[in-house]
Image: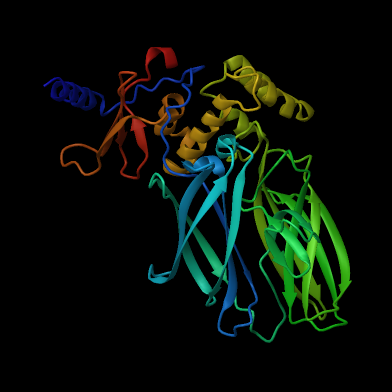
């Protein structure tokens, strides 16, 4: 009876508050660490197309990456074992399934510490033969020990390489391209490539490598290769031009950009290929530059600072926003160092959890301004995952609404979709200590 009464009281409160929003901005919030619940293993995917020996299809490489800590390892004798399943399904523009693949594999380590290390990643790739076309790729990763799973969607273009004109492959962004013969994750010809699956580079690695191939050019042809690095406004930050004589029918190319001075944000690399008489082709790829002490989704330094609004004081926000470029990275590092719950260890658990919540909100509550700015995002970042969620999307006498319950904290929040577009607004105020 108490549960029924409580929910009737909240519904009454909801009806009273339905037509106004008493949201009050707070200057600083106490973010609570580690609710201990997972939504599914985080992972990254990428695709690249190359010419194949089959005339009716192209060779599509599917890359995926996840941290060891994303899976549940179980003790097996002297070792620890994790098992996973990853599936890829391709759909055409009309939503019809074209093909699908499922792979199962396992990871084995000797020590438990390896299963939780934030420095251990698993990267793999699969080679598929796909007819040229435009596809929606749906990928699912399942932890077979817990049955938790996550999904990713991506639109991909698989070009044809069988025309009369010369062609080029997709562009791979990599952490390294070398002539190494050992520990090679992905090999093309004489090159060993370490693909950056998420296309997110950080301030711990000073270089960005490019790799692509050209087909159908005969020996003796001269190709002008123009490489450009641009910011999201299109401003050219670095440029280089090379002239190369073709010596093989299939030509591999590698190039390196220095990125150690880039601030957080989105950037683009472009390769323009010119072959007389004036035939030009371009390959472009975007990537994200990330600082270790900023969220991966930060589009620039000021967004990175703004994403701290739920935990930073007004004085800290002002200092970070007004800092000169040469001091910004250091100040962000100091900001999180002051909040490290375990300063004697290499990890900052609060920082990791905070940014995990920011990224989760961007995926689940995303909109024009980013899910971390939404009302549900604000509550999730401060309090973490709710213990229980009531969803009412199709009510006859009220607007769509959700009720979030935090049972241990004895907190309840009501969100209303006033306009029917999935943008739920908070209609119950934040609790006093978080205003």
Q: Is residue 283 above or below residue 65?
A: below
Residue located farthest toward the left when viewing the structure as drawn: 1
| The quarter of the displayed image where residue 186 is located | bottom right
Q: Is residue 132 above or below residue 7?
A: below
Task: Judge left or right: residue 124 versus residue 17.
Answer: right
- Asked if one can make out residue 435 in the rendered structure from this viewpoint, the answer is no
Total numbered circles:
0
Residue located farthest toward the front when viewing the structure as drawn: 77
Q: How far across and down, in percent of the image, does residue 244 sit?
A: 87, 71
Q: Is residue 139 above or below residue 378?
A: below
Q: How far across and down, in percent of the image, does residue 169 sit?
A: 68, 70
Judging depth in this view, the residue of 402 and 387 nearest the camera is 387
Quadrant housing the N terminus: top left
Judging depth in this view, the residue of 199 and 269 nearest the camera is 199
- Asked if one can make out residue 168 in the rendered structure from this viewpoint, the answer is yes
Q: Is residue 170 above or below residue 347?
A: below
Task: Judge left or right: residue 260 versus residue 332.
Answer: right
Q: How far across and down, in percent of the image, does residue 196 sit?
A: 66, 52
Q: How is the image coloured?
A: rainbow
Judging depth in this view, the residue of 181 and 76 nearest the camera is 76
Judging depth in this view, the residue of 285 and 121 nearest the camera is 121
Q: How far across and down, in percent of the image, does residue 272 sit?
A: 76, 66
Residue at 56% from the left image edge and 79% from the top image edge: 57
Residue at 16% from the left image edge and 38% from the top image edge: 397
| The quarter of the displayed image where residue 224 is located | bottom right
Residue located farthest toward the top when viewing the structure as drawn: 433
Quadrant housing the C terminus: top left
Task: Judge left or right: residue 331 versus residue 130.
Answer: right
């Amino acid at each position: 009876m108490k549960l029924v009464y409580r929910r009737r009281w909240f519904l009454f409160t909801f009806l009273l508050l339905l037509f106004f929003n008493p949201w009050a901005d707070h200057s600083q919030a106490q973010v609570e660490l580690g609710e201990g619940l997972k939504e599914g293993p985080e992972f990254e995917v990428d695709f690249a197309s190359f010419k194949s020996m089959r005339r009716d299809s192209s060779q599509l490489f599917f890359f995926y990456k996840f941290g060891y800590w994303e899976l549940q390892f179980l003790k097996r004798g002297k070792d620890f074992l994790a098992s996973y399943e990853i599936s890829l399904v391709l759909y055409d523009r009309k939503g019809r399934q074209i093909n699908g693949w499922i792979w199962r594999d396992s990871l084995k380590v000797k020590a438990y510490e390896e299963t939780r290390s934030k420095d251990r990643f698993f990267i793999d790739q699969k080679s598929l033969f796909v007819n040229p076309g435009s596809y929606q790729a749906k990928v699912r990763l399942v932890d077979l020990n817990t049955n938790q799973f996550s999904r990713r969607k991506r639109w991909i273009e698989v070009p044809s390489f069988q025309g009369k004109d010369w062609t080029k492959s997709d562009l791979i962004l990599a952490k390294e391209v070398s002539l190494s013969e050992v520990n090679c994750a992905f090999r093309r010809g004489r090159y060993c490539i370490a693909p950056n699956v998420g296309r997110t580079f950080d301030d711990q690695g000073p270089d960005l490598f490019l790799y692509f191939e050209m087909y159908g050019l005969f020996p003796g042809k001269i190709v002008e290769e123009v490489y450009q690095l641009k910011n999201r406004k299109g401003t050219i930050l670095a440029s280089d031009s090379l002239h190369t004589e073709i010596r093989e029918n299939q030509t591999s190319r590698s190039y390196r950009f220095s990125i150690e001075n880039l601030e957080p944000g989105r950037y683009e690399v472009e390769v323009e290929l010119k072959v007389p008489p004036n035939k030009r082709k371009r390959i472009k790829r975007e990537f994200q530059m990330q600082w270790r002490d900023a969220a991966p989704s930060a589009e620039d330094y000021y967004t990175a600072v703004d994403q701290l609004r739920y935990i930073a004081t007004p004085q800290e926000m002002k200092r970070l926003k007004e800092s000169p470029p040469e001091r910004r990275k250091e100040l962000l590092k100091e900001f999180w160092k002051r909040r490290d719950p375990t300063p004697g260890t290499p990890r900052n658990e609060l920082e990791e959890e905070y940014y995990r919540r920011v990224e989760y909100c961007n995926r689940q509550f995303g909109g024009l301004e980013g899910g971390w700015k939404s009302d549900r995002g604000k509550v999730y970042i401060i309090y973490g995952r709710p213990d229980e969620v009531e969803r009412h999307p199709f009510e006859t006498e009220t607007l769509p609404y959700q009720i979030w319950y935090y049972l241990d904290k004895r907190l309840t929040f009501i969100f209303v979709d006033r306009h029917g577009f999935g943008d739920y607004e908070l209609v119950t105020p934040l609790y006093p200590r978080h205003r």
